[in-house]
Image: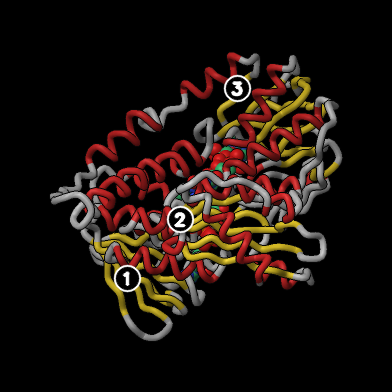
């Protein structure tokens, strides 16, 4: 092994969070090593947000065209996956090539190392034969991978995760989806809109189980409207593959499909990082951090690996906090009260902060304002495709919103207004006196505010 190379910072994993940290520290003049064992940019641009939202955009165009009868005449829709696969391959991922992203990082003055990094001692990282001594510290941004549950027969089969589902140049005739969370639901609807016969198998009693129950109802109805079969409250017990998949469920029934997509959650793989050499627990599920993203002595962690919310905007947010801490710039520490999320179904389901149940569990004096979207002016105007609702959650004692859900057309955009209110703790009295443009979807938030104070 060659002698340890002295640097300021080593960033392990150059996904969304790591690339942001490494790039900004390098641009600030630090001597930064960025290590990535797959593609710089991580899951989001190559197998996550961007390609799946390209699918969603295409599927939504088909769905909107199918709404023309009754609204604007006749339509004939002939779905074709080829332009979607082409956009993903050529425009979004450069055929899964990260040269542009590597150049972006080195252009800021960083040193890129392709390989798998592990900690060998406090402040020390090894990649292959080279050791690095990081005087300022180490940033761990290694993300998560798809969880593959220990179901009998599954591991030996050619099941898909989000990666194969995103890389598919052609579509199967049928697909079973294990898991009705964000990944399962989004991919199920997108595939179904291109003619794939999709069945979602969700172990808990409802899809999108982390969100409001009303969100689960809207999501289940939307999937059903696109021909997706959703079975809930059953778990897969056995998987067999003989060209197609047979999945035996806990109620004894057997489902078949050409492909099987496993979308049962994500896990940080901490066991392979040598964390024990830095005084951290390699058996933990996630790396616990303080409000400055410090996981230990001269160790920071950002993104999915912290378990604070597996979203690109969370990785970027935590990266910003860590960078400011490393550079001694101060500013606000991490604050998770107004964590937004959007499930990109049609209708979109935006949410921020607490659900009603979370607020009740926290012992708050909860008030709820609820409005079905089709009872708002814009919902009525919109007609077909106007499913959804607006739900606001208030802490009546403090007179502020602590959460909300905006399900419907532009639900992901509408949640921005609720995010501001939760983040800035805008008094409900101020929100009530706000003027909401007519007839926008977001004007429904004014209706929900009135329903809240009347409740
Ligand atoms: C199908 C899908 C759709 C999604 N859609 C959305 C969405 O619409 N909106 C949203 O906000 N989020 C979405 N997400 C989540 C989003 O992709 C993640 O939250 C985000 O990528 C997390 O960034 P990260 O930097 O923490 O980790 P990652 O992007 O996972 O990057 C971590 C990187 O570290 C590398 N690495 C790991 N270990 C090592 C090691 N020892 N040495 C070197 N390199 C290593 C990995 O190869 C990886 O490239 C989606 C995810 C999936 C799977
Ligand atoms: N629009 C977005 O922002 C977006 C989109 C996709 C993914 N993501 C991120 O990625 C994360 C992971 O997504 P995900 O959908 O894989 O995970 P998830 O945790 O959101 O959902 C997994 C689902 O699988 C179910 N499940 C687990 N084991 C099962 C089994 N054996 N049989 C049947 N069902 C089972 C769970 O009950 C759960 O509902 C999300 O939580 C989110 O943070 C975000």
Secondary element under disc 1, as helix, strand or loop, is: strand
Dot 3 or dot 2, earlier in sequence: 3
Dot 1 or dot 2, earlier in sequence: 2
Q: Residue at x 79, y 38 (%)?
A: 299
Real-space Cα separation, disc 1 to disc 2, in angstroms = 16 Å
State the count of labels: 3
Is label 1 in contact with label 3 (beta carbons under 8 Å)? no
Q: Nearer the viewer, residue 377 or 297?
A: 377
According to the picture, the residue beneath numbered tag 3 turns out to be 112
Label 2 within 8 A of ligand 2 by Cβ: yes
Taking the image as shown, residue 340 lies to the left or right of residue 274, namely left
- Which numbered marker is on residue 183? 2
According to the picture, the residue beneath numbered tag 1 turns out to be 229
Q: Would residue 241 be seen by someone viewing this image from the given angle?
A: no
Q: Residues within 10 Å of mark 3 (few under 14, many from 20)?
A: some
Q: Residue at x 72, y 69 (%)?
A: 366
Q: Residue at x 72, y 41 (%)?
A: 301
């Amino acid at each position: 092994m060659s002698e340890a190379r002295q640097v300021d910072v080593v960033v392990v994993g150059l996904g969304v969070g790591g690339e942001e940290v490494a790039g900004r520290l390098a641009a600030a003049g630090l001597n930064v090593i960025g290590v990535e064992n797959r593609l710089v940019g991580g899951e989001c641009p190559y197998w996550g947000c961007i390609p799946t939202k390209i699918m969603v955009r295409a599927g939504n165009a088909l769905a909107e065209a199918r709404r023309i009868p009754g609204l604007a005449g006749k339509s004939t829709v002939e779905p074709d996956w080829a332009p979607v696969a082409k956009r993903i391959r050529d425009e979004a991922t450069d055929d899964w090539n990260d040269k542009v992203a590597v150049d972006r990082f080195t252009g800021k003055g960083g040193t890129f190392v392709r390989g798998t990094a592990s900690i060998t001692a406090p402040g020390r990282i090894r990649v292959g034969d080279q050791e690095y001594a990081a005087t300022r510290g180490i940033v761990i941004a290694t993300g998560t991978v798809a969880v593959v549950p220990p179901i009998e027969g599954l591991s030996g089969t050619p099941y898909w995760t989000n990666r194969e589902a995103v890389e598919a140049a052609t579509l199967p005739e049928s697909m079973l989806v294990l898991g009705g969370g964000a990944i399962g639901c989004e991919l199920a609807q997108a595939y179904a809109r291109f003619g794939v016969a999709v069945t979602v198998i969700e172990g808990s009693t409802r899809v999108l189980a982390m969100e409001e129950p009303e969100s689960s109802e809207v999501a289940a109805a939307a999937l059903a409207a696109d021909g997706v079969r959703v079975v809930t409250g059953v778990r897969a017990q056995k998987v067999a593959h003989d060209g197609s998949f047979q999945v035996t469920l806990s109620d004894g029934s057997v489902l078949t499909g050409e492909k099987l997509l496993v979308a049962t959650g994500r896990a940080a793989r901490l066991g392979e990082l040598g964390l024990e050499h830095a005084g951290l627990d390699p058996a933990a599920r996630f790396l616990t951090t303080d409000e400055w993203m410090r996981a230990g002595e001269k160790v920071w962690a950002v993104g999915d690996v912290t378990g604070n919310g597996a979203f690109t905007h969370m990785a970027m947010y935590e990266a910003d906090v860590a960078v400011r801490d490393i550079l001694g710039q101060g500013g606000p520490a991490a604050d998770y009260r107004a964590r937004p999320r959007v499930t990109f179904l049609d209708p979109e389901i935006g949410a921020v902060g607490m659900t009603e149940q979370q607020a009740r569990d926290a012992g708050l004096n909860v008030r709820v304002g609820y409005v079905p979207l089709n009872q708002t002016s814009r919902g009525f105007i919109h007609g077909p495709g106007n499913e959804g609702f607006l739900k606001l959650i208030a802490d009546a004692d403090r007179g502020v919103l602590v959460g909300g859900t905006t399900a419907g057309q532009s639900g992901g955009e509408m949640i921005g207004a609720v995010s501001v209110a939760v983040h800035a703790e805008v008094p409900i009295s101020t929100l009530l006196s706000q003027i909401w443009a007519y007839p926008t979807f977001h004007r429904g938030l004014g209706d929900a505010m009135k329903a809240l104070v009347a409740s």
